Image (cartoon, rainbow, N blue to C red):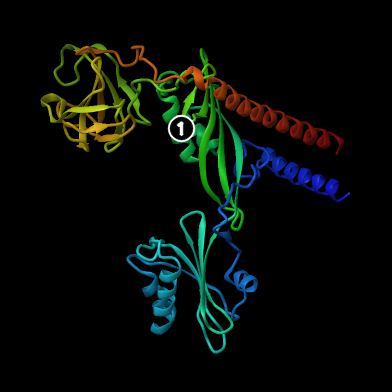
Amino acid sequence: MLQRFIIFLLSFTLFTFDLENFVGKKTHASSILILPEKRPYMSNKYNFSLGTINDMILKEGGKTIGKILKQKIKKNETLSLFLERAGYQNKQINAIIAKIKSNHPSIQILRNIPTNHLINYSVPKNNLGFGINFKIGKYKDLYVWQDNLGKIETEITRRPFKEIKYLNKIEITDNLYNSSLRSKLPKKIFSELVKILGFSIDFQRELRKGDIFETLYSQKLDLITNEIIESNPIHYISAKLKDNHLKFYRFTNRYGEANFFDEDGKSSRKTLMKTPLNGARLSSGFGNRKHPILGFTKMHRGVDFAAPIGTPIFAAGDGIIEYSGWNGAYGKYIRIKHNNTFKTAYAHLSKIYKKRGMRIKQGDIIGALGSTGRSTGPHLHYEILLGGRQVNPLRIKLPSGKNIPNNEMANFHEQREIINSKIFAMQNNIKSKEFAFLKNLQKN
């Protein structure tokens, strides 16, 4: 009987949560929620964090404390300086710091507490003891308090969290960025989505109104504060364009390396990126054009992307910086040799971050967009050189990255089907919730 009640309670809770998503009350109004994943494995080295210092004292035993206050660390302030500002005596401060260092010699938090870091504390008065509590990173807490004899106790605990998967749907109405904001897609997930699809889609030229993007991703929820700790990673992306339907799955191989592959195990990555910057507009294509400064028709041997000055420029692929510096009409200029076949060039930069001879990875920031050299306004002039000859970056067919080897295909198929089954369950779950909701509305 008890088991049935628990199942009913869980079902009712999830139904209510999903229903609120459907009618638009939750943050992820367009996302579909499924059951949380099992709580991640927590090392036996740490107990779970509790809600307050009082909760810890009640659990472990200790002197009663007064009102719990909250303040943030100021710039360049250490824990010692904070406690002095909060009203602790020097003798107490020295004893607290010494105890923390003695019990937890490996933690670095005392050396560099971030500005605006929140400290929960109570100041000892009369017969009341003290208590201190603050987060260490995203997943741990440090508690400091006194036992009934006045001895200082400390404990590092692990903050309890759960992982929830969302399936977010974006329908393009104007551009990908604005449409993603309306769908409540987290910014970190949006950046990863653009990076993954940037090899296959030209976001400036290929998107049309009505195109559909679906993203399956995870969020970690702090069970004490009910706040999102972080959003990652993406497990699956689907892009339904007018003339194309792309699907990419996250696959982790036997060595723990994760990358994205299509349904057949082919890499989402290409040797080079089509557009080595985000949020830009194609302002001039490859081919003959009337030069805006010289005034006569001249071959334009690259493509121009207009964007604000300072926009980060990414390395289009792995390689070595072959040229870095001023280059006549090109202004501040970088050229990367990727292999014996391909090179890329980036002109009119405002800043250069990489020097000649440096080895770089695809996606590394190598400079900032500008308007140096012979330029009428802020833009990036981007070239791909094939065998030393400039070719059209938007039309060249680029070789893919490494595909999944045959001895990993069975593992990939297994991971792919797990993701597909979750997506199927989520899509059907929300449809049944919507049907039940509409049916109840009709009755009323």
Residue closer to the observer: 169 or 63: 63
**What residue is at 38 percent from the left and 83 percent from the top?**
90
Residue 187 at x, y percent in the picture: 47, 40
Residue type at tag 1? Tyr
**What residue is at 35 percent from the left and 15 percent from the top?**
398
Image quadrant where one finds the C terminus:
top right
Residue 185 at x, y percent in the picture: 53, 37
Rendered position, 422 above or below 130: above
Residue closer to the observer: 177 or 388: 388
Asked if residue 2 can be seen in this view, the reply is: yes
**What residue is at 38 percent from the left and 66 percent from the top?**
110
Q: Secondary structure at mark 1?
A: loop
Asked if residue 376 can be seen in this view, the reply is: no
Residue 122 at x, y percent in the picture: 52, 77
Rendered position, 121 above or below 264: below
Question: Dot 1, crowdedness within 10 Å: few (<14), some or many (≥20)?
Answer: few
The reply, left or right, for residue 318 in relation to residue 16 is left
Residue 287 at x, y percent in the picture: 25, 11
Residue under numbered circle 1: 255
Q: Which residue appears farthest toward the right when viewing the image?
A: 1
Q: Which residue appears farthest toward the bottom when viewing the image?
A: 126
The reply, left or right, for residue 336 in relation to residue 241 is left
Q: Quadrant of residue 79?
A: bottom left
Q: Which residue appears farthest toward the left when viewing the image?
A: 328
Rendered position, 440 above or below 288: below
